[in-house]
Amino acid sequence: MAHSHSHSHDELGHVVPESLFLKVLLALLFLTVVTVLVAQVDMGKWNIVGALLIATVKASLVIYFFMHGKYENRIIWMYILIPFILLAIMIGGVFTDDPFRSKPTPVGVSQQS
Amino acid sequence: MSSNAAVAEHHHVGPGDPPHIHHMDSATAYGAAKLGMWLFLATEVLLFAVMFCSFAIMRFYHLAEFHDASHHLDLKAGAFNTVVLLVSSYTAAVAVTKAQKGDNKGIIKFFGISVACGLIFLLVKTYEYTGKAHHGMFPVVWNENFYEYKNFLGLYYCMTGLHALHVIIGMAVMVIYGILPARKNRYSGRYYTPVELGALYWHLVDLIWIYLFPLLYLVG
């Protein structure tokens, strides 16, 4: 991921050719068509897995090329990855807690035991 | 000491020159600014992460509601907006390459396209919101249609509303820090930090939408 690029003194960041950006855009548009088509097929709970997988591939393309992630150092990659790890911990924490709590009975609903 | 003397001799910042920052050469300042921007973007992701987490747990409890409600969204409008944002992200990336080559006209042109795309996005979003309002599925003018899908629609408006706010801020950033200084030939291969940071912010706006579109419009 982190490329160690030798920068010349008057070059601050890596200059990415515009043609590469165009290829990435075409890939992103193609994946958008794919995600819409895949959603039309009923695969039950696998629909959301597929949609999230394709979205993650698209997000990776944006970070890696559009946001120059390919040319950034390890510290910036730490900043890129940590929020996603924290999100995973938060979702994991909520799903191993909330569904197992006893819920108060809603007001106006007669208690059945 | 010799570099300090050189700085003292050139106190006037000409067009294309990096600003003078004490105790820091321009390459260090560029790296520090970019690091700070990425840290800020990390907090932005965490802001939306709370909403994605809410979405996950509410979808878990109200799967049937989410499935039905997502079919009430305008898939064509959502898909169109996805394409608009992807194209705008591409032009923002190109604007950075233009800036690195010292092409100020290129910054104006490509950030201009990105800002225009942001405007199109907001217009389509307004069209979608007013359509929902017409059926009583919008806050303030809600009716039983809204209550039937209150969990999904509540999250839909929170997530797309916060995202739309980011679109507006991103457009302002590209105009104020990109287009306006570029009109005065402010940027060059030696100094284009605000252009790159503005583009990074716009890519984040695109990034969030890449997840919002399938979750809200496609799988519910």
Image (cartoon, grey):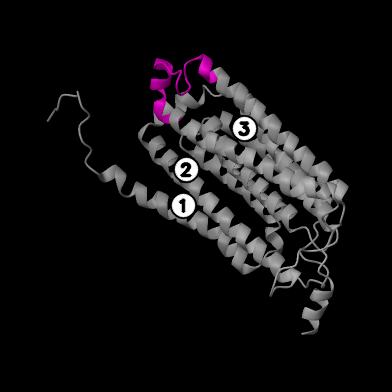
Image side of residue A1 versus residue B175, left or right? left
How far across and down, in percent of the image, does residue A27 sit? 73, 44
How far across and down, in percent of the image, does residue A104 sit? 21, 36
Quadrant of residue A53 in the image? top right
Task: Quickly name the residue at label 2.
Answer: B52
Label 2 Cα neighbours within 10 Å, binned few <14 / some 14-19 / many ≥20: many
Q: Are marks 2 and 3 in contact (CB under 8 Å)?
A: no
Residue A64 lies, with reference to residue B206, above or below; the image says below
Chain containing the residue with disc 3: A
A78 magenta-colored: no
* Foreground residue among A12 and B149: A12
Label 1 Cα neighbours within 10 Å, binned few <14 / some 14-19 / many ≥20: some
| Mark positioned earlier in the residue sequence (1 or 3) | 3
Quadrant of residue A40 in the image? top right
Q: Amino acid at mark 1?
A: Leu
Q: Are marks 1 and 2 in contact (CB under 8 Å)?
A: yes
Chain containing the residue with disc 2: B
Q: Amino acid at mark 2?
A: Phe
Residue at point 42% right, 24% down?
B149
Residue at point 78% right, 38% down?
B113
Residue at point 47% right, 43% down?
B52
Task: Quickly name the residue at label 1.
Answer: A87
Disc 1 is placed on an element classified as helix
Disc 3 is placed on an element classified as helix
